[in-house]
Amino acid sequence: MALVVLLISLLAPPSAPGSAAAAAQPPPPVTAATLVYLESPTDTPGQKLVGALLDAAVFVALVAVVTFVLVALYYYRCTGFLKNYMRFSAFFVLFSMGGAIAATVLRRLGAPLDAATALVLLFNASAVGVLSVFASAVPIVVRQGYMVALAVIVAAWLSRLPEWTTWIMLIALALYDLVAVLAPRGPLRMLVELASSRDDELPALVYESRPTVGPASGSSSYASAMGSVEMQPVADPGRSGGNQYDRVEQEDDSSRAVVEMRDVGGSRSSIRERNLEREAPMAVSVSGHSSNQGGSSQHAVIQIEQHEEGETVPLVSAASANNAAPNEEHRESSSSDSGMEFEMFESTRGIKLGLGDFIFYSVLVGRAAMYDLMTVYACYLAIIAGLGCTLILLSICKHALPALPISILLGVTFYFLTRLLMEPFVVGSSTNLVMF
Amino acid sequence: MTVAAGLGYALVALGPAFSLFAGVVARKPFLVLTLLTSTLFWLISLIILSGIWRVFLPIRSGAWWPYAILILTSVAFQEGIRLVFWRLYKKTEEMLDSFADRISKPRLCLTDKMLISLAGGLGHGVAHAVFFCLSLLTPAFGRATFYVEKCSRMPFFLVSAIISLGFLVIHTFSMIIAFNGYDERKRSDQVFVPVVHLIASVMTLINLAPGGCVIGTPLLCVVGAVTLQYCWQMVWRRLSEQQHRQFSS
């Protein structure tokens, strides 16, 4: 389920960067990424390549330096400064960059809006955004919405970069990500380890995919399920499994679990009865065919689908023979604790995806959108496939993994393959209305 | 011809797939994964195919035989991909079953298998529709429409949307037929699928003739309907057999 949420929110960014970038084609702004070299269409490919390489190197170096500074600040416990800095930067991004993009969109749509109203609206929106991103008492939907909005804004800004620079920069960032997370003294790795050893909250922008604990269950049971999960002791990283079924057992033992079956189609009743028989010792008080009308608000609703066993299996049993591997996406709640940009890692409580990953995925897709829709679909699929691969690897390695490299490399490969090979083929055959 | 038309074309091509997705696939994450995998498979097969054919393109002559060869190779290749996909699925299923045994949960039942094959087929069909129809549809959102020279009665987008719909139906349900055929080792089902695919592809060759799309497109829809009917019969037979067996045991 969380995976679906994730996919949907990944799907959301592409359109916006595409449209915003299509709407605005001003001369590319001078940013950190184009300090050294500003691409002009008349240059030769060699010149462009060298310039783009330089740009990417400078950009990556900047990112690395900033990351090191942040890690150092965190190491010496300047959390107050860090928090305020993050708040300020989020506000700045929402207010100025978001404002610029909103102005472009408004101009593009020809919608009249006077400056005072726009300012008030913008200020309100960004204030709420900052609050919702960094305060914990905000509904998760709002927070996720603002996370996605932040990612979209930054991505739209970044996809105004010239083409060669974008590609080289994406690849360089993917490589940097690989190094920073996996190298023994990599900054991001140090950060994550520090955060998990201190077990406290790091002010960073992390997209958490909190599970949907069943659409049928009301908010009260949702909250209690969260509570019950969060009360569990945090497993140490070595046993970062916390197998899903363990948890099911635990909650069954407390004997106030309503098991709601959502089984698969046809032979519904038989499966249901079989399962209920198995659950009968624990859930007998509330079982029966109307088992899910437990009603009282402290029932945690667990959903066992027959398929849901299956769905962890390809991820798990491909990984390891014993089923102690952690499961990813389902029904685990994640409280926001640690993590940094570029990070995808998983505690017992869910997966977290650094906001930076979102941003660069969106940059990739947005850049693909400037060519054709076909490349967008191909890149999108490739990114999803890369995410899937990373998830599988995650269940093998059980520590923080970089989410960028596989996805970005696959995405770039698919982009160029699609552009060079597939497009003439598909267009050629389908404009003749020959398909297969 | 503005946004409404573009949306309409997109829905003609992808509407049934969307409702299948929302109604059946989206509820079960494993099916979503299957769908994505098969979509990726199809995309990769398309890329490989186009990599092979890139050398010979674009076909300038008005003759029809290069297209026939193209279609023959493509269909053969894609049926090969289907076999690979089946092997992969078989492995996954074994893993699932052993896993289910270990945690003492029931194994996959017949309807689950059929759902998985449906998701796989839907992935193929959606990929086809997306790459052959949806990716060319962007101009349809503009103010004009486009007619191919050979087919001056219907707008190009409408024809391609309907053809995509037909292929979506064919891909989706022939995957169910094929998986069942492989499962039961029934020769007729195994042969039926490539034959249908080939027939449907050859139907599109009619579009090369002047004015042929008026004939070819409905024929393609008929092929899709035949596939649907065949699949329905087969699924019905399997299900009733299974029910019978459950009764007797």
Image: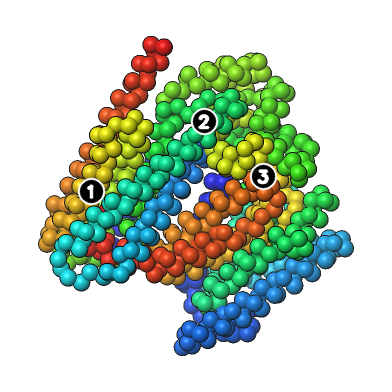
Residue placed farthest to the left in the image?
B210
Q: Is disc 2 on the same chain as disc 3? A: no
Q: Nearer the viewer, residue A92 or A162?
A: A162
- Residue B119 vertical placement versus B98 (above, below): below
Residue B119: x %, y % from top left: 41, 41
Image quadrant holding the C terminus of chain B, namely top left
Query: Picture quarter containing residue A65?
Result: bottom right
Q: Which residue is mark 3?
A: A350
- Sequence-wise, the earlier of marks 2 and 1 is 2
Residue at 34 percent of width and 59 percent of height: B49
How many C-alpha atoms fall within 10 Å of the one at disc 1: few (<14), some, or many (≥20)?
some
Which residue position is annotated with label 1? B198
Residue drawn at the location 46% of the way across and 63% of the way down? A414
From what the image shows, is residue A287 above or below residue A306? above
Residue found 70% across the figure and 64% down from its top: A180
Q: Which residue is mark 2?
A: B97
Q: Amino acid at mark 3?
A: Gly
Identify which amino acid the numbered label 2 is placed on.
Asp
Disc ID at residue B163: none
Left or right, B144 with reference to B94: left
Disc 1 marks a residue whose amino acid type is Leu
Q: Are marks 2 and 1 on the same chain?
A: yes
Q: Residue furthest right?
A: A76
Relative placement, left or right, of A289 versus B23 is right
The secondary structure type at the circle numbered 3 is: strand
* SS for dot 2: helix
Q: Could you confirm whether marks 1 and 3 are on the same chain?
A: no
For disc 2, the chain is: B
| Image mark 1: chain | B
